Amino acid sequence: MFKKHMIWIFVCLMVGVAKGVDLDTTFSVKWNNEPWGSGGLIPAGPPWNMVGPFDFDNDGFGDFIVSSSYAGEYCNGVYHYEAAANDSIELRWVYTFYDLSCTYDAYSSVAVGDIDGDNKKEILSLVDTSPGVSGQKGLQIFEWDSDSMSFLSQPTITYDMGLDSVWEACQIYAEDLDADSKEEIIVSIMDGPWSELGTGGSSRMMIFELDTLDGDSAVFNLEYQDEVWTNWSGWNISVGDLDNDGFKEIYTVGYEYFHIIIHENTGENQYEYQTDFYVASEFYQRSNQGILITDIDNNGENEMYCLTSGVNSLSGELINPGNFFVVEGVTDVSNLSYANFNLFSSYTGGLRGIYLGNADGDDKPNIYLAGHYNEAVYDWEYNNGDPTSPDSYEEKMVFLDDTTDNYTPGNDQGKLRIAKVFSGDIDNDGLGDIVFSSASFATDKPQLYMIEHNGVEELHSDQEIYVPKPLSIEQNYPNPFNPETHFRYELSEPGYVSLKVFDILGNHVVTIYEGFKTIGVHKTRWGGGDKQGQVVSSGIYFYQLKTDGYSITKKLVFGK
């Protein structure tokens, strides 16, 4: 049986690798940064991690944050970019971690959140620190300053996470996991060099929350940690509710074999291990930063899209391709396994980042994939139908680097290795943009790109037009409630949303959620606490769901 299964996979792989993909000419390059060889030393090193879009100063122009990986003179750093008029992007702020590790291929990972609940965004940067060097703090947090309209020049909060080192700062994520109106920080790290794995090095996932902040002194509450990994780190953190039970899962992906580890929030500050399994049979079938959970067909049942990076030789030849999988119909994540995965396609150059957007403006959801060694950005546009069938999508390339690759002997850095991708109207000109990064040391190629749609929609006569539902939120349940109530809302396009509670006089009681959400159905909870964590008085309250240009307000009742 196993042999038959592997033969079927092999056939599918070959079909996926061999098929051609059309280049969508409705997108064109509008901006890129200066390559290293032209004097563009920022970012200093390949930007492995990038998050966006945001609008920190509420001026209508998109912001995004980049972190770099580099050793030696320039070390690693974090960078704030903002779009400007006329299809341009400018560097607004930079911080370089000279006081931390610059010995190895130093790595930093970034997220954006509001962990202190003051309605000011922070950059959260997870940074490599040197093994055996005391006093180094791997978590560095920079708060937005509304007076200077920039991030502060020095870290607002630092934290060593109780580790001897952060030898590989793999991923950081910020979200309110347990609906207590406080954002948790999730990190995946490797504590100890690769050579020490099994003899002293370990990988882990940690979840912690800011407890108190007194001036420069911050106290964090460690809510959970998983130290079961014995080799290699978790290179991806994703959060979602795949089984639609109202409780968020945390998905961490181990590097080797595309190893998925799942934990689930089960209450305030409570988490439980669910399962772990491999989505590959070959040692080098790896994964990096490639899971998306959404309800793409708006049927109330979430899908999970995930990627493997595969492996290529130092000159870019195929060893194992990267794969694109889809999962749906999971009612209990503890039972999730490789058998649930539907293979969509394979890519000789592997895959890295994934993002849900609608840059072509046709109201059909688009899944953008970062084609790593293929030097391409792929667009899987959903056209209605079964989301687990490739026939329900149209696949195109929206970018392809066709310039000459100047290889450096002994490494693969000549290629434009596309790593992260996001979309939106970044430059506020009414046309959709896609921004992506290159994880390459190539001196003759840019590290950051913005491509833009020309506004002309390409439709085929045999395609069914997808009409999304408007912004909506259901009545909370139960209502009246005590001790907690649940919310279920739906978005027709990705963007920033806020869900807030107000009292009968219009006073702001608490923010249940504020941040970026993808297309589809989302669920969250409220345990009746206000901004200070105190249980509110019995009575009538109002909750408001708000996004760009839309808001919905409904009544709820809390009874003790």
Image: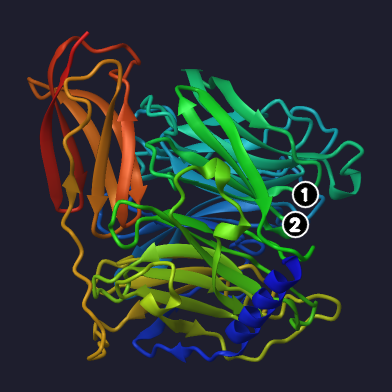
Q: Which mark is residue 260?
A: none
Q: Nearer the viewer, mark 2 or mark 1?
A: 2
Q: What is the residue that sits farthest to the left in this orientation?
A: 505
What amino acid does circle 2 point to? Glu
Closer to the camera, 423 or 457? 457
Q: What residue appears at the point 59 percent right and 23 percent down from the top-left corner?
A: 222
x, y percent for residue 278 = 69, 55
Q: Vertical placement of 98 versus 410: above or below?
A: above
Q: Is residue 505 left or right of residue 307?
A: left
Identify the residue at image location x=71%, y=73%: 4
**Camera-nearest residue between 373 and 281:** 281
Examine the rendered structure and indicate whether residue 111 appears above or below residue 80: above
Relative to 523, does residue 386 appear above or below in the rendering?
below
Residue 495, percent from left and from top: 30, 54
The picture quadrant where one finds residue 5 is bottom right
User: Considering the numbered disc 2 on the image, is that residue within a helix, a strand or a loop?
Assistant: helix
**Residue 486 sits in quarter:** top left
Asked if the residue at tag 1 contacts the one at tag 2, i.e. Cβ–Cβ closer than 8 Å, the answer is yes
Look at the image and tell me whether residue 124 can be seen: no
From what the image shows, is residue 333 above or below residue 134?
below
Question: Which residue does the image show at 92% across and 38% down from the upper left?
Answer: 199
- Please state the horizontal and vertical placement of residue 239, each as a whole percent of the image: 48, 45
Horizontal relation, residue 405 to residue 325: left or right: right
- Number of labels in the image equals 2
Q: Earlier in the sequence, mark 2 or mark 1?
A: 1
Amino acid at dot 1:
Trp
* Position of the C terminus by quadrant: top left
Q: Position of residue 275 (x, y in %)?
A: 62, 41
Residue ID for mark 1: 232
Mark 2 = which residue? 256
